[in-house]
Image (spheres, rainbow, N blue to C red):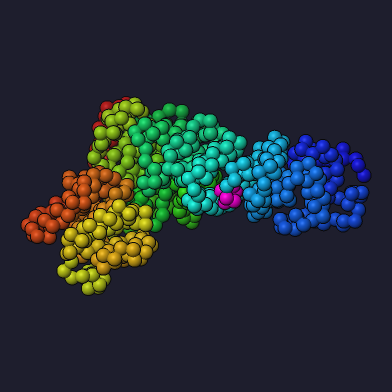
Amino acid sequence: MNDFTGLEHTPGLKAIQIVFDDWKHVISLLVNYILFICPYQLGVAESVSYVRPSENLDDIIENNFFQALVCHVNDKYSLPVGISALILVPFFYYNIKNPVVLYDLLNYAMESYLLLESSLKKNALEFTQKLFSYFPSPCQGCLMSLEYALPGDIAAISLIPFAYHIKNLSVIRELLNRAVKAYALLEPSSKNRAIEYIHKLLSCVSPQCQISLLSLAYEITREKKYILRMMENEIIQQLDCQQKASIFWNIKNLLFSDKLTFNIDEIIIFRRYYQSYVDGIAAQVHLPSSPKPIHFRNKNRIVLITSQLLKIGHAPTRNAFDYSRNLKKIGKEVFIINSADYIKQTALAFYDWFNADFIKEYSNNNTIDFENERYPFYQSKLNMPNLQDIQKIIDLVNEFNPELVISVGDATLTADICSYFTTVVAIPCGGVLPMYPKDCWAVPRKFLPSDRQIFQAFGIPEERVFSIHYTFMKKEKKRLSRRDLKLPQDAFILCVVGNRLDLEVTPDFIAQLEQIVQEIPEVYLLFIGGYQNYDRMAEQHRILRQKSVCLGYRGDIQSIYPLCNAYLNPKRQGGATSGAEAMLDGLPVITQAYGDVYYQLWLKQSFDTTDDIIIFLKKCIHDPDFYLDQKKQAKCLGRKLFDTAGMMQEVLVNMEKYFCKHEF
């Protein structure tokens, strides 16, 4: 009856053994209930029949075995059942894959702790500190929350290791979302304790858990140090390639959506992180022994690699097909590859995470059609990055033997790896520099003063970098009237267009719009695209409710621009496609000297203040000759922005110059 020599010494048992003097007595109480081992004839519990463990916390606490344990703990610490129950954490962690149970356990402990007198709170902390010394490290975080006396939804972030343990990233996302909401309700002193709590947790969890906690810390503080810490060697050297990719794409998404800004030194850190990530994967695959000389390559062949290929409404997809179509027109044989590097989240959980779309059916195709033309095609089969698909793409490119590879996008992993054995020219889909320094760079905008610092930091020679006019695809147009859309006939209509207007129409932009419509009665605002918050915004701003409308997403947007008078751009990174489409119909573009709309569309004028915009609009309204000249300038530049054949020729001419200067 008292022989426990054959009993497995689990982490939970180890904690129980050290904490309690009479540990065999505690085991005799718990062995049936907690460890699923039976039958034992336990003298201390003869009257209690065997009960299979439940996943319901109330059932556990009301069970006679557990009540006997509580009595034993009370003899030593005089603690209520809610705090005594923390002894069960390792058991739940390793045996029950239900996060709700642990969540309830921590909430119950915190509620019990807050009701204690100060002397008993000291006992509770002594109890948890002793448990901490012997709990396995993934379970230690669950013992820290009492010390900081934080709400349950913040204390519960200590369950992140458990959620990784059961491989449930959705649970982590829910924990992070609840913590952010709870943090917003705290008093300043409690917010400081919450940050201290996160720091304490960071010291005792895995690198994967640290990334999730760092994303939380950034969300509630907006301090960049937490993002930069994600890229430190101490963390990333313990991560696999998919986890490193997850960090890269999530940071990149924050930058693109203007939720994060980097200075030039931080940009260089981010770029070095990406370079290290690419080089690390390149070291794990089989590459051709040396770069292939240009005179051994097929000058009529080009491989085009994109990191995402969806439907034609997706701008990078339009670019990939538009480039391919125009290259084919000038006699090039084009092989399209979707490496699908723009990943689906399966490796790490971030607070502000995203999942890239992926059309799985494309992976079954070896050709793809666009506008009655057929192209050889390959799409990665598995979630990227994976060595199997990367090796397949390397072999396909090497076998196809193109003159060069065109990388669609600023960070296309497999295309960048191809630069080890052939020539790669990267064409970003926005007004940014390519990420990988071994490629040639076709920069789709005017050069910025800060660009030179990037070139110098990575030793990129000027002959590998050239500037081009980025181009867009024309959309079908039909005849519409203002009456069809119930727009005011005599208004001067400013259109605001975008897929992310909920993020881009900020309070500052709304204040700017209010000032414009107040000072210029002729102005009317037309929102087009993703703006679910429009109705709420209109309710809160009476004048905008009277002087605006939102059409939502429109497949016939090119037919709507002729009904407008000018294009107004919020301060944002994206928007170049809609801006170019508006210019093609002669709409002057009103923007700050910032982001893709200004730099990628090669605009010559910008507006620093709302007053500047108002002066310009009044002149357009009251001076017909001035407005007509503005429309002509916009249309002239707009035509150039839709000349993809000209852009492709521009790229090939620059690459020919590069080949003439270098022997391969």
State which quadrant residue 266 falls in.
top left
In reply to whether residue 45 is colored magenta, the answer given is: no
Residue at 53% in and 50% down: 179
Q: Nearer the viewer, residue 356 or 252?
A: 252
Q: Nearer the viewer, residue 376 or 216?
A: 216
Residue at 37% in and 35% down: 267
The C terminus sits in image quarter:
top left
The N terminus sits in image quarter:
top right
What is the x, y in percent for residue 197? 56, 41
State which quadrant residue 146 falls in.
top right
Q: Which residues are magenta?
A: 151-156
What is the x, y in percent for residue 512? 25, 54
Q: Main secondary structure of the magenta part?
A: helix
The reply, left or right, for residue 216 in relation to residue 45 is: left
Q: Nearer the viewer, residue 388 or 639?
A: 639
User: Can I make out residue 559 in this image?
Assistant: no
The reply, left or right, for residue 2 in relation to residue 632 is: right
Residue at 23% in and 50% down: 591
What is the x, y in percent for residue 166? 64, 48
Q: Nearer the viewer, residue 311 or 128?
A: 128
Please tell me whether residue 203 is drawn above or below residue 115 in the rendered image.
above
Residue at 9% in and 55% down: 626
Give the total of numbered labels.
0
State which quadrant residue 125 falls in.
top right
What is the x, y in percent for residue 257? 37, 48
User: Can I make out residue 420 in this image?
Assistant: yes
